[in-house]
Image (spheres, rainbow, N blue to C red):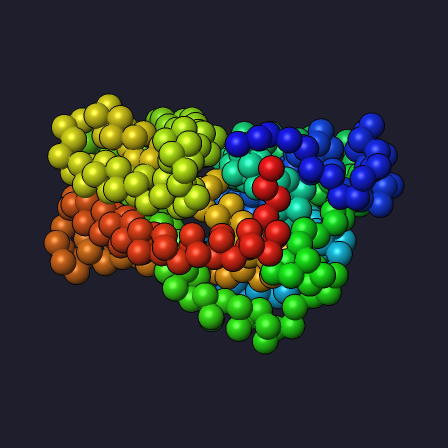
Amino acid sequence: MKDSTHTLPAGSPVDSPLSHASSGGTVLDSAYSWYALFIMAVACALSYIDRQLLNLLVDPVRHSLQITDTQVSLVQGAAFVSAYLIAVPIYGRLADTTNRRNVLVAGICAWSVFTALCGRAESYGELFAFRFFVGASEACIIPVCYSLIADYFSAQRMPRAVSLFHVAPLVGSGVSLVVGGLVFALANNVRTLLPILNTLAVWQMAFVLIGLPGLLVAAVVFLTVREPTRSQATHPKAADRPYTVRETATFIWTRRGFYVRFYLSIGMFAIVILGLPAWLPTFLIRVHGAARATIGFQFGVVVIICATVGILIGPWISSAIFEKRGRSDALLRTAAWSMIAAAICCAAVPFTPDVTSTLAVTAAAVFFFSLPTGIMPTTIQLATPSRMRGTVGAFYTFSSQSIGFGLGPTSIALMTDKVFQDPKMVGSSIAIVCPIASVIACWLLFSSLKHYRRLLEERKANGALNAA
């Protein structure tokens, strides 16, 4: 398959990010496309740093506001996730109907300000409210960036681009652990240098110092990232106008053979992604006597390395094994087979004799369930008209977050508490819940292949894919 550069319209300058930002068109697969992807990835990583900072400040916040661990957990989870799930469909619709660059800028500004305002919270209610709005603001990232990436890259380059974008959350999560501690220390120094800030606790200054730099990222996005020309929709002229909610719903419903199966598979997939990391450290501590002080670092390194490799290598495996054999559904097929491999690895967890073997099995599991992370969003972008990509991307996020958070860690906990009634059986719970979810996801993906191929053929017939 040819690897060429596609332009729309012709004559757009390609000299620099700034020249692109002032141009009237978009050059697909260009150096500027990769620049825009990098800036979006930075914004995504920043969002993960902002949202996870609270995890490092639990005790200072709890003592300062005189709240319980349960109340802190509600601020960490319920406040953020509930707002995220409410807002993500709204951002999806905005991504389909308005200037996506501007939506992203507004979102970055909002979550940066509300993160900083968390540092001004003087009560539990204020902290909960500010955290709620952080979640609502950060919900813009996935639907908006997915839609932008699909119009910056051709069908051939999109899998790689999406995979690289998905490295950002891993980087953000890792950086938050390092930078968060440094910022906490820096906050104390700032209070010493600027007595006017002495009214703020150290944890409050940490929120301010993490939140405000996001405004600089927002400025970079606004000044150097250009709203790309939308690719053709189902009909070439359809990209000129947004679809109505009814048209979008009709499109998805009439093609439910693919979309319903795909969204459910994403939910099952999320159960594994969220469930295994949530309980594996506990398994290592309870069963193998791992030291709490070191297992977090060891497991974190395994996740960062193996997940990054899996995300980046997924598109290559798809191309090398399936696409070269003429499989138009290569991306989806790769995701399905990877879930089988992940299921086998998860099933082996309770049979590992020590920490080292457990981490080895986990490394393989993380690698296999990371393979679809970059390629599954690409499949749905390729199958969907440009003016609907924000909405379907929002449903993608809603499905993964609601099912994943709702059933992932909780189902493993319930299996341990209610079925086995033994805390040390958490490994067996992992070995039951994660493989079952993986197999269901695999079945859903395989059963959707013919529907996906039909959808791609429909798109190609209308000249809607950026094919070489």
**For this rendering, which residue is in front, 18 or 74?**
18
Quadrant of res 40:
top right
Q: Residue at x 47, y 70 (%)?
A: 254
Is residue 353 depicted above or below 406 in this figure? above
Q: Position of residue 94 (x, y in %)?
A: 68, 63
Q: Is residue 159 visible?
A: yes
- Looking at the image, residue 241 sits to the left or right of residue 306; the answer is right
Left or right of 280 in this view: 374: right
Q: Residue at x 60, y 37 (%)?
A: 468
| Image-based side of 58 in relation to 358, left or right | right
Give the left or right position of residue 207, taking residue 380 as reference.
right
Task: Say which residue appears at 84% left-offset and 45% top-offset.
Answer: 24
- Establish if 380 lies above or below 224: below
x then y, percent, for residue 348? 17, 36
Residue 130, x across and y down, in percent: 63, 59
Most distant residue in the bottom direction = 246
Could you say which is closer to the camera, residue 144 or residue 151?
151
Quarter of the image where one finds residue 86: bottom right
Can you give x and y, in whole percent of width and height, for residue 367 in the image? 36, 32
Quarter residue 286 falls in: top left
Q: Residue at x 53, y 73 (%)?
A: 250
Q: In this figure, what is the number of numbered marks?
A: 0
Q: Nearer the viewer, residue 296 or 203?
A: 296
